[in-house]
Image: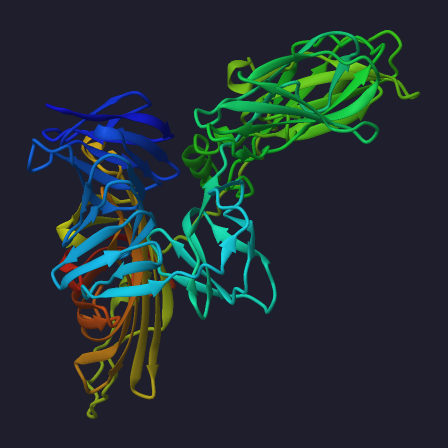
Amino acid sequence: MSEAGYIISSKKDLKRRGANSLIWEDTQAKDTLFYHDSVLTLSQSSAKLYLRDQTDLELSENTLVTLEEPEDKTKSEIRLRFSRGDLRARNPSFNTSVVGEDWVINLDKGSDIMLRKDQGSYEFEVVSGAATLHTQNGDESLTQDKILKLNDDHKVEKVEKSTELQWKEKKPIRIYTLEENAKIPLEWSGDARGLVINKAGSDEKNQTISDSKQTSQVQLTQGSYKIRLKNASGLSEARTVEVWKAPHIYLKKPLPRDRLKTNEPYEFIWTTDKGIKTYRVQFSSKASPLKQESADQNFTTMKFDQEQDLKWQVQGEDEEGFLIPALYNNEIYLRDEPLQAPKLKLPDVKKAPASTPGASYKSKWHWIYAAVFSEAFAKNDNYEINFAWESVTGADQYILEVSSTPDFRDPELIKNLTQTSYIWKNVKYKKYFWRVAAGSAKGRMGLFSEPMELQLDEIKVIEAPIAPAQAEAEPVPAPTVMPEAITAITKIEPVAEPTNITITLPEIPSGWGLALAPSMKYSKTKGEKETQIDLQGPVPMGFQISFNSGWIDQRNYRFNFWTSQQTWKPMPVTEFPFQDNLKIRESILTFDRGHINEKNRFGFILHENFISKRQTQESLTVQSEILLGLRTSRLFNPNENWQNTLGLSLLTSGKVHELMFDGQSKLYLSNRESKFKWSIGLGANANYQKQKSGGGLQSDLIFLLGLERF
């Protein structure tokens, strides 16, 4: 293999795959690149490549290129196959070619060009130099005064560039945000009338600008953007804006509300992240200005010489100097002579008396409930914890903190006490951390003790006595019936048949039903670019709701709603390293009406299904699609304990069409005269889905366990 260059720098997830490999490998700065290698940047990732003969290549997030060997190996030309994303190429010494699906752009020596793909269209812009775009419809020259757009219909659109509109700052903007979106400040010169906002993978958006205004704030969701100014004479150069999710920096030490002694060194420790190069440790108070220390590691040592209340937080900077905001701050208290930390004692733990379901029943049902539910409710028993500690000289009060997490950011319990113990009641079964600090009514603070971990299931619990159950009442003996009486009762005289014939409606009682409805799912659907989704397996989350109106003026109305949800993981992960888990929800809502003289029923159906959508070059996502259709069905055996339903539906959403068959059988486990009836059943639906990018088959085998009230 011939070397094609190397990686200058990379941000976060950069992958490389060789020509004969199926595996994407992690790649980092100074790694060698070879011809026929594919290079991929993932979300919130970027890279700078140095290719043979001084060609520089900058890749934004979600960009895929392949380094191709020149056809004429005697020439020092670089050939790139551009699949998707956003790149910038500079070739100071030799010509360069960039190849797309049905186009080629040749860069003259010394050119600087930007390429971008949004949905199915491409955008080409020359920053310096010149280039020629070759398409099946002909050639177009590209210079600095225009932008070329190649659309889905293979037509080339020319857009003039306005020299009047200029950005005050042309460097790329990268904003790290802790929220889903961020406000981006923009400033320019010239009479701009609007902003053209292009987000990678999304449609172009336009935003109007007020007259004579030269500043604006745009609110953008996370992603990569190109923003241009617009007026009647054309568009400005593109400004690159990246809105990235900020890495979370968690503070480990000191803990919130910790007390520190002045003139003594203390370690400040926080978590690290591979996307952060340097850290800014910031201290602020009401009385003094912000103090800041830089650190290359995730710790530093500080000493303070005066009493004060401080808040400390940690910001970060990535490799390119962009700021990463602090996630939160911790408040700490510095004191000259703090009270000593109390010594903690091992807590006493008692389990409160259990309340068994059905305990109010003074019959044999009490024992049945106790036997069935005692194990299920064992872990829901409440505990009483007696926290205790030794007294501290000079203290007349104590602060007790109990937290389910070791960072004490949001304690479950904070108590200001005058005694050296406290009983915490109604405690649920889990793990806790607790600590105590001394204090005085005059305002003197004390150091917190080191937190003690309390794992309830590892402590010998003292069982509280349970009051004995009351004796059951003596059963009342059944009345004695003499054999003669039985004989007399069973001798019933035959009744003559009625002479008239009564016609009754088939029994379809009104009422409602609920059912657990897990299922087995099978789906094989073609997605874009012949990529397929192939899913099969159990779907444990599902339920069904049904309603029956009974007979109303010789008509019956039925409503049924079934829904399920499942997360599908790519298997094996090594073959699908960029495929996210697919979270799929499917729901079917049916409504139909039947007449006394008709065997078939007619109505409507609403189906929430999913269609595939390309997320990246190497992965897919799914999006919800609502289809509406007409339905015909038939109910069999309405008077029997075993009921069957068959249905046929034709649905559409305009861009997706479906033909669906469904059926359901239920067996009632109790007498038909009962108000409440348990039922078990089996349902199924199968549909053929046809969409623009392909089609496929889907089916669900549904298991039903329900309770109905008629």
Q: Is residue 484 visible?
A: no
Where 630 falls versus 99 (above or below)?
below
Say which of 622 and 349 sits in front: 622
Pinpoint residue 375: horizontal percent, then vertical percent: 43, 30
Residue 528 located left or right of residue 459? left
Where 157 falls versus 344 (above or below)?
below
Residue 110 located left or right of residue 102? right
Q: Quadrant of residue 281?
A: top right
Residue 296 located left or right of residue 33? right
Residue sitting at 11 percent across and 31 percent down? 19
Pinpoint residue 577: horizontal percent, then vertical percent: 25, 33
Q: Quadrant of residue 510?
A: bottom left
Say which of 64 and 435 sits in front: 64
Marker count (numbered): 0
Say which of 424 and 648 sits in front: 648
Q: Identify the image quadrant of the C terminus.
A: bottom left
Furthest residue toward right? 442
Residue sitting at 53 percent across and 29 percent down? 317
Where 269 falls versus 659 (above or below)?
above
Where 610 falls versus 548 (above or below)?
above
Say which of 625 and 280 sits in front: 280
Q: Is residue 262 visible?
A: yes
Pinpoint residue 681: horizontal percent, then vertical percent: 23, 55
Q: How is the image coloured?
A: rainbow
Pinpoint residue 39: horizontal percent, then vertical percent: 24, 34
Furthest residue toward bottom? 500
Q: Identify the image quadrant of the N terminus.
A: top left
Residue sitting at 23 percent across and 85 percent down? 596
